[in-house]
Image (tube, helix red, strand yellow):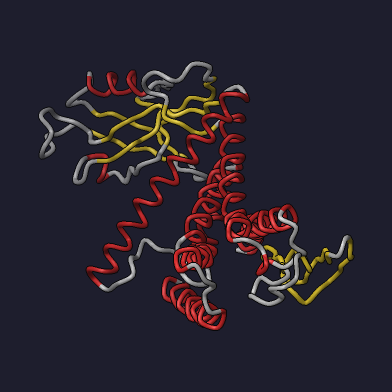
Amino acid sequence: MLLTALLFIIVLSLLVFVHELGHFLMARKMGMRVDEFGFGFPPRLWGIKRGGTIYSINWIPLGGFVKIKGESGEDRTDADSFASKPAWQRFFVLVAGVTMNWLLAAILLSGTFMVGAPSVTDGELPAGARVRDPVVRVMSVLPESPAYRAGIVSGDAVLSVNGQAFQEAELARQFITERSGEDVTLVLQRENKEAYQAELVAEQIPGVETKAVGVRLVTTALVSYPPHLAVVYGVVATATTTRDILFAFGGLLRDLVLTGRVSSDLSGPVGIAVMTGQAAALGFVHLLQFTALLSINLAIINILPFPALDGGRVFFIAMEKLRRRTVSQYAETIAHNIGFLLLMGLVLIVT
């Protein structure tokens, strides 16, 4: 439990720190004064001032923060203030955080493709793919089948069938099919658990034409690529994951509007911490993939046009350009405060 909490803090700190680093770098690039760039949250443990900016390390190790002069609308007449800069410069500072989160995800996923990511290897693989440690795994189990009753679940590794080991799912399937009506002994292993044995006899299953034991097998292996291909696949994976998460968010929003209930698929900090521990238990590559997934989620959530988020602040800049005059700072502040309270309420609900 302590290790899970520690891993969660490390992952969360990395994601938030990288996000704030994006704001910091872009603000400096646009000539804005950054009063403080801190790792963790106050109270301050240590700090040093360089070039007008305090670089600090703080006691609460949950990410970081950046204080940009004029970010709350003050000091509009000062040339180095956020509030005095043109809309396009403020826009780039606001979106720099989520851009860094997407960049981090692409780097992490590229790294997993370089060292070897667990993948299904049945069928043709892209050119340049290197395959190692192939394992036959259970892809799915049919309800009320012999395999289901034996306690076999998706993800179990098939170590042997009737004492014979297989490295290709197709060969294992043929071996089982050829022994229809006979006892088939499978030795399987669940992640981080002892191997277990299942005695199966093929039988007629509703919806299946022939007798079967009720498992779908696939070949999985660690698949790695040369660096130049790994980067390409990392960027593509980041884009496709972003698309999939957006579709999922759309479904959650639709359910919220139609039913008035928050989906059980949403997880709060506690749920995410548990999943972080589970990913780490599966191995370092799985933890990298999960961290990339969280980074993409953080980017998408932050860019939503909701008050208190980066996307909400971008929305007010867009309103300013459309109306050709500055939005009331008082009204914007109230909107962000209300948005923050609503977000905290949502976090409590899903937790």
List x then y, in percent, for residue 186: 35, 32
Q: Quadrant of residue 33?
A: bottom right
Q: Is residue 309 left or right of residue 8?
A: left
The residue located at (44%, 46%) in the rendering is 242
**Vertical side of 5 occupied by 128: above or below:** above
Q: Nearer the viewer, residue 195 or 271?
A: 271
The residue located at (28%, 33%) in the rendering is 216
Q: Nearer the viewer, residue 100 or 204?
A: 100
Q: Is residue 214 left or right of residue 227?
A: left
**Vertical side of 285 occupied by 217: above or below:** above
Q: Nearer the viewer, residue 67 or 249?
A: 67
Q: Nearer the viewer, residue 215 or 176?
A: 215
List x then y, in percent, for residue 100: 62, 49
List x then y, in percent, for residue 194: 49, 43
Q: Is residue 39 left or right of residue 211?
A: right
**Vertical side of 122 occupied by 47: above or below:** below
Q: Is residue 140 left or right of residue 67?
A: left
